Image: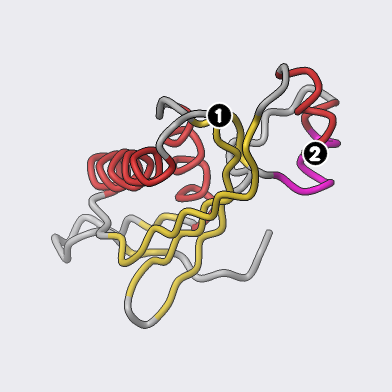
Amino acid sequence: MSEQPLLNVSDDSGLGTVEIAPEVIEVITGIASTEVEGLFAMRGNFASGVAERFGKTAHSKGVKVELTDNGILIDLYVILNFGVSIPQVAQNLQSSIRQTLKSMTALEIDEINVHVVGIQMDSKDNAENMYE
């Protein structure tokens, strides 16, 4: 497992601590993103493409979480459907992710940066081969 620090989210109530790994934030972000209209796919890398071909769903594909001194920084790499309003879809992604993470983890997110890396114009079958 990676050596990234865990996020401490518990109060000092004497019951113990609750810590959340950054990988959990990536998965929650990926799932919240798929619920936004206008998103075609998340941009993955070669490893996530191979894993999906063997039946393992990579929910954190296209998501990078970084813990900084200012807070949590999230970068999304997305492919949008042709004809959608890019600023509107990006804002919907940011709102959905922020709301989902707040309700599930009680963490405040410093930044959610949306990087549009492609526009989907063909059928889904062609795009899966092209972007993985």
Secondary-structure class at tag 2: loop
115, above or below 66, in the image? above
Q: Residue at x 55, y 29 (%)?
A: 81
- Stretch of the chain drawn in magenta: 44-51
Of the residues shown, which amino acid type is indicated by label 1? Asn
Residue 131 image position (x, y, % from top left): 77, 38
User: In the image, is residue 107 part of the stretch drawn in magenta?
Assistant: no
Q: Quadrant of the C terminus?
A: top right
Instruction: Give the distance between the C-alpha atoms of the residues marked 2 and 1, in whole angstroms.
Output: 17 Å
Mark 2 residue type? Glu
- List the residue tagged with mark 1: 81
**In front here: 19 or 126?**
126
Which label's residue is closer to the chain start, 2 or 1? Answer: 1
Which label sits on residue 132? Answer: 2
x then y, percent, for residue 76: 52, 52
In front: label 2 or label 1: 1
Tell me the residue at 49%/56% (across/down): 21
Dot 1, how many residues are within 10 Å of its Cα: few (below 14), some (14-19), or many (20+)?
some
